[in-house]
Image: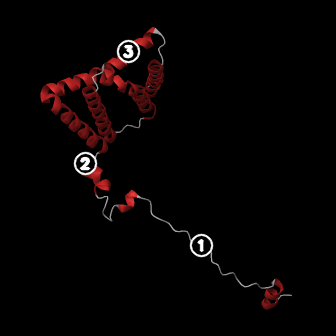
Amino acid sequence: MEPRIRDEIGAIAVVAFALLSTVALATVQGAVLQWWRSALFALLGWAAWLVPLALAGIALELWFGFIRRETSLPILGGVVVVFALLGLTRHYVRDDVAGGFVGGALAKAAAGLFGDIGAPIALGALLLVGVVIAANRTIADLWKPTRHADSRRYRHALRPPLRRRRRPSVRARPYTHPGREAAKAGCR
């Protein structure tokens, strides 16, 4: 079988899986979808809603091949951001659905290593690392437009420029009779 045919079949299967995941998360229907819903919420908590989006991205990759080597690192940064957010939500919201198993494991590991006060600091640092990796910029580069909010150099970023409308001229052109203009031009 040709690789493009294999990719097409895989993309169709992943799109179907993404749609079934959306149905499973939105409603409670069928034994398999109920199991899938409970597994997603148990594993990822509120981030279970990102699974259909991730599956749709995988299907697009199989169809169009848009992921290149330089885009894989920002995707990894996005995954780090999601994991850090899961850990932070599980640390602050002591609900099983908040961060799921992944968030609970990260929050528990961070609390075990750094204590209850140090855990959000460590998870926040992990979040910032993920943002830096995803944006491929330093924090200073990301902060520049808002850091100098009072300086004249960045003032244009805060508000749109004022544009004054020109008022039409009040003076009217003097009236000339069309016959006189033709006479001046030499036509009768």
Question: Closer to us: mark 1 or mark 2?
Answer: 1
Q: Residues within 10 Å of mark 1 (few under 14, many from 20)?
A: few
At horizontal 36% and vertical 25% (from top left) the residue drawn is 46
| Mark 3 residue element | helix
| Mark 1 residue element | loop
Residue 157: percent from left, percent from top: 38, 58
* Badge 1 vs badge 2, beta-carbon distance below 8 Å: no
Quadrant housing residue 100: top left
Quadrant of the rendering where the C terminus is positioned: bottom right
Alpha carbons under labels 1 and 2: distance apart: 46 Å
| Mark 2 residue element | helix
At horizontal 40% and vertical 12% (from top left) the residue drawn is 35
Nearest to the observer: residue 179 or residue 71:
179
Residue 21: percent from left, percent from top: 44, 20
* As drawn, 181 above or below 9: below
Model colouring: secondary structure
Residue 87: percent from left, percent from top: 26, 28
* Badge 2 vs badge 3, beta-carbon distance below 8 Å: no
Q: Earlier in the sequence, mark 3 or mark 1?
A: 3
Q: Which mark is residue 167?
A: 1
Describe residue 58's horizontal placement relative to residue 129 as left or right: right
The amino acid type found where label 3 is placed reads: Ser
Alpha carbons under labels 3 and 1: distance apart: 66 Å
Q: Residues within 10 Å of mark 2 (few under 14, many from 20)?
A: few
The amino acid type found where label 1 is placed reads: Arg
* As drawn, 39 above or below 46: above
Q: Which residue, given by chain and number where applicable, does mark 3 sit on?
A: 38
Q: Earlier in the sequence, mark 1 or mark 2?
A: 2
Residue 96: percent from left, percent from top: 30, 19
